Image (cartoon, rainbow, N blue to C red):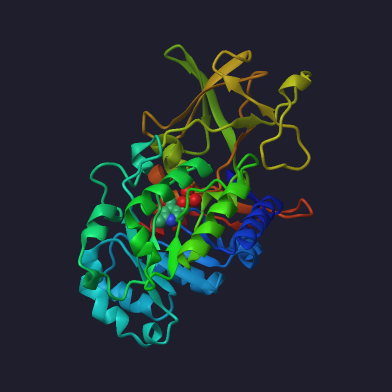
Amino acid sequence: MAEFLLSVPALERNARILRETADAAGAKVLIALKAFATTSALHYISAYADGACASGLYEAQLAAGHLGKHIAVYSPAYSQADLIELLAFAHHIDFNSLSQWERYRALCTQHPRARNGELQFGLRINPCHSTGHTPLYDPCAPGSRLGVPISELTDCAPQRLMGISGLHLHTLCEQYTPPLISTVAALEGQAAPLLASSAIRYLNLGGGHWITKPDYDRAALVELILRLRQQYGVQVYLEPGEAWCIHTGVLRSQVLDIFEAAGHRHAILDVSVSAHMPDVLEMPYRPSVFCTVPTASDASRQQPAVCLPGEFYHASGAAGELPHTYRLGAPTCLAGDVLGDFSFPRALNIGDTIILDDMAHYTIVKTTHFNGVPHPDIALLLPDNSIRTVRRFSFRDFAGRLG
Ligand SMILES: Cc1ncc(COP(=O)(O)O)c(C=O)c1O
């Protein structure tokens, strides 16, 4: 049975780094639930976070139930019904457009929680400064709907911003500090007077910061935040998702069949790329793959980033690099539902375990029941190396969600 296996010690390691960095900078660090919302695992890291960042009502409700603390919500658009519910318990509600803000301003600012200071409102800015390489993940791409373009904000009449006390930007994706520094420079280049105005009390620098990567320059991040706090008198928020979970989880799958067709050796797994790892197709990217097959060659011995107990795992090379190449594919009808061609130190067998690395963030939250392929279990690897299955899916889950 396939299984998403999440390592609690690895999650705690990332959480400690994020807490220490935020403390050094005097910043608040939130967990972006869009990346990871497995509540049984959040339980182990919530103490390290200042709260959560939610993409709408459901994630905000999850945050209220499982994390408490500060709840920051940003959505490209709110329905009035959702907004009314959010006003009752969120702490920051960030709007994507002046149109939505002006439509809801009275409803927001007259709310008792806004009047007593428990609730503040912000606007997402698009600094129009692209630093990424993948248009699908670039909120600053030309024509983007995400955030008010910075020049429109700086040109607008001050009364349009009445009631706004926060600025929010999210422009990065899996990035180090230089793109952040250049983005902040772009923001300051056009909006320094707005940042410095006494109305603006918080600056949310969004997610996409690879803070828990070993080579991330955390000192540079701390220095930048300390300066922003000092210069503009703002409380700085970070809301990473991936940084909490990078290198914390794997997807364990099994080989269901092996055969030759069209000049390729195919190995069919019991998981689907489309249904269980959609970012592999969307980004696209090539995951690291390991197998449990022992060989005489120590050279190929490697662990996935999450240290799994008891077995040795062997990294596969690119096609043709190691003696046995397979096209790893899914048991679905979608022709392109393949991980790619990977090579292994020895021939695979039906029933072998294949480990797909780094499948915690943006993977578990995005899964579907496409083709009715059984959904992998979700399990926690605990500090004593025991495994606790926290969710097992059945036919009822497949049929139940389709109406
Ligand atoms: C507004 C916002 N905040 C935070 C995040 C989290 O980003 P990441 O998981 O890359 O850190 C995202 C991701 O898309 C986002 O859109």
Q: Is residue 232 above or below residue 17?
A: below
Q: Quadrant of residue 312?
A: top right
Q: Quadrant of residue 50?
A: bottom right
In the image, 267: left or right of 400? right
Q: How many marks?
A: 0
In the image, 397: left or right of 297? left
Which residue is pictured at 39% across the width and 81% down the height? 88
> Relative to the observer, which residue lies in front, 320 or 57?
57
The N terminus sits in image quarter: top right
Q: Quadrant of residue 196?
A: bottom left
> Relative to the observer, which residue lies in front, 143 or 223?
223
The C terminus sits in image quarter: bottom left
At which x and y percent is residue 345? Answer: 67, 18
Q: Is residue 132 visible?
A: yes
Q: Is residue 126 above or below residue 215?
A: below
In the image, 156: left or right of 267? left
Q: Is residue 352 visible?
A: no
Which residue is pictured at 45% across the width and 56% down the height? 205
At which x and y percent is residue 347? Answer: 64, 18
At which x and y percent is residue 27? Answer: 56, 63
At which x and y percent is residue 402? Answer: 34, 56
Q: Is residue 317 above or below residue 329?
A: above
